[in-house]
Amino acid sequence: MKKKFYVADDVADMLNVSKTTAYRIIHNLNYELKARGYITVAGRVPKTFFDRRFYSEEMPDKQMAESAY
């Protein structure tokens, strides 16, 4: 069965950050998902959502401006 979620170890390896930072990133992404009405699992983030947020080539102007800081 193919994994549908990333865990902190996965995120830490992909982004070259500490495990603590990876957990913080997952927490923030899950907060976004909850605000959109999705059910989340602590310590895990859906692969599709993570990939879209971190590796999407199309970024709205507002998000691009905010991410510059």
Image (cartoon, rainbow, N blue to C red):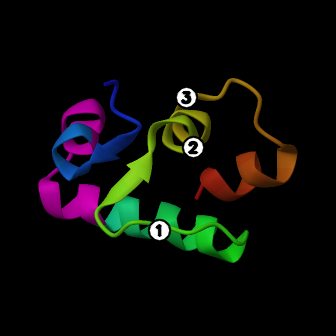
Identify the residue shown where x is 71% and y is 72%.
37
Q: Which residue is mark 2?
A: 49
Seen in the picture, residue 42 relative to 1 is either above or below; the reply is below
Q: Which residues are magenta?
A: 11-23
Q: Amino acid at mark 3?
A: Tyr
Placement of the C terminus among the 4 image quadrants: bottom right
Residue 55 screen position, x and y as percent: 55, 28
CA distance separating discs 3 and 2: 10 Å
Relative side of 11 to 55, left or right: left
Relative side of 46 to 9, left or right: right
Q: Amino acid at mark 1?
A: Asn
Element at label 3: helix
Element at label 1: helix
Q: Which residue is mark 3?
A: 55
Mark toward the start of the polypeptide (3 vs 1): 1
Placement of the N terminus among the 4 image quadrants: top left
Element at label 2: helix
Front residue of 46 and 65:
46
CA distance separating discs 2 and 1: 12 Å
Identify the residue shown where x is 47% and y is 68%.
28
Does the stretch in magenta take in 19? yes
Does the stretch in magenta take in 13? yes
Between label 2 and label 1, give the one nearer the viewer. Answer: 2
Mark 3, other Cα within 10 Å: few <14 / some 14–19 / many ≥20? few
Residue 66 screen position, x and y as percent: 69, 58
Front residue of 58 and 1:
1
Q: Amino acid at mark 2?
A: Phe
Q: Which mark is residue 19?
A: none
Mark toward the start of the polypeptide (2 vs 1): 1
Q: Which residue is mark 1?
A: 28
Seen in the picture, residue 17 relative to 33 is either above or below; the reply is above
